[in-house]
Structures are given as structure tokens and as C-alpha cells.
Image (cartoon, rainbow, N blue to C red):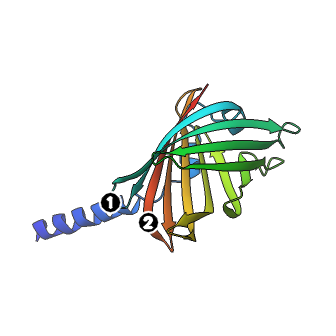
Amino acid sequence: MKRRLLLSGGAALAATGLAGCGTAQIADYAGEKPQLDLRSYFNGTIDAYGVFTDRAGKVVKRFTVLMQCSWQGPRGEEEGVLDEDFLYSDGTRQKRIWLLKRQPGAAGQGRYTGRAGDVVGEATGEERGNAFYWTYTLSLPLEGRVIEVQFDDWMYLMNDKVMLNRATMSKWGVRLGEVTLSFSKR
């Protein structure tokens, strides 16, 4: 009887522990350092190096990105331009220009919206501590057609020059793959 109680108690404890392993929240990073200020980091020239991996973890594409970034407007309501030039390992090139807007006022503190030509609707994001989390839907060309995929995108500031980025790509809730990037500020 004691053994059965110990086993069932252990199983309940394990289940409780696993239940606590949910999805990360931006608030989890509020106390992390160094403090990320998107407007300061994404300002000037940035080089990025990345890979796209499929569901099995196989690298499908490698790429580099040259970014020219700038912000304008009154403090607290700046608008940013992230001009990205991609070069893929197969020689193809792509350009994406993000237009970011910091949300005004205390209620919008640390919150951003973004648009780009291949983004469906509006991206929404928030920075806390050393992290930035945002979500968006991207139109991707695939085998002669265009599909819309959802991005769950996390960025982590490592120091004043380096930021790491991990984005999960999904369609209809099914994980398609992951993009991993390293940003290096000049």
C-alpha cells in the first residue's frame, strides 16, 4: 500500500512539474540583463547569419542578411525602418523592409507593431528585459505558389553587439520548421 501511494504521489508530482512547463512568456524575461531597447540595437548597420531547419532539424537553407536600420520621430513614439537584404546559400536574393512603430504612452511601453510587404496584416511584439517577442504571418513563395505561415519569433540580447533570434514557423498549428539567426551590430 505504501509503495502504491509513493508511486501515485510521484506520478502526481511529475505531472504537476510538467504542467508548469508551458510556453515562455515575455514577462519571464523582465529582470534579465542587458536591457534591450529595440530602438538602440536596431540602429545603424547590422549583419545577420542564419539557417532554416525543417521539422526534423535538417538545415534546408543558410543565409546572410545585411540590415540598415534607423528611427525617426519624438522620443517614445519613434518609427523605425529595418531595411534587410538577404543572400541565400543557393545564390537567390530577397529584400524586406520592416516599418516598426513603438506604441505611445505608458500602456504601450515596450510594445511595437510592424509591417512589411510580405507580412499579412500587422506584426505585434513586446520587449522586456533582454528579450523581444513578436508574432506575424508571412507570405512565402513555395514551389510556384504563395503560402501564409505564422511566425513565433523570439530575440535575446546577449551584449551591446550580439543578439540571437529563434523563430518557429507553423501552418494551421503544425510546426514546419525553425529559423535561427545571430545578429552582429557594427
Q: Position of residue 150 (x, y in %)?
A: 56, 64
Which residue is identified by label 2? Answer: 175
Give the answer, above or below, for where 153 lies relative to 149. Answer: above
Please give the name of the residue rendered at 76% of the width and 36% of the height, measured from the top-left corner. 70
- Counting other residues with Cα less than 10 Å from the Cα at mark 1, is it few (<14), some (14-19), or many (20 or more)? few
Q: Nearer the viewer, residue 14 or 128?
A: 128
Give the answer, above or below, for where 165 lies relative to 24. Answer: above
Q: Quadrant of residue 77?
A: top right
Q: Regarding mark 1 in the picture, which secondary structure is present there?
A: loop
Q: CA distance from mark 2 to mark 1?
A: 10 Å
Q: Regarding mark 2 in the picture, which secondary structure is present there?
A: strand
Q: Position of residue 13 (x, y in %)?
A: 29, 61
Please give the name of the residue rendered at 28% of the width and 66% of the height, measured from the top-left corner. 12
Q: Residue furthest bottom?
A: 172
Please give the name of the residue rendered at 54% of the width and 37% of the height, measured from the top-left corner. 48
Q: Position of residue 61 (x, y in %)?
A: 43, 51
Q: Which mark is residue 56?
A: 1
The quadrant of the image that shows the N terminus is bottom left
Q: Is residue 166 left or right of residue 107?
A: left
The quadrant of the image that shows the C terminus is top right
Q: Residue furthest front?
A: 91
- Counting other residues with Cα less than 10 Å from the Cα at mark 2, is it few (<14), some (14-19), or many (20 or more)? some
Q: Nearer the viewer, mark 2 or mark 1?
A: 1
Callout 2, which amino acid?
Arg
Please give the name of the residue rendered at 65% of the width and 38% of the height, measured from the top-left corner. 67
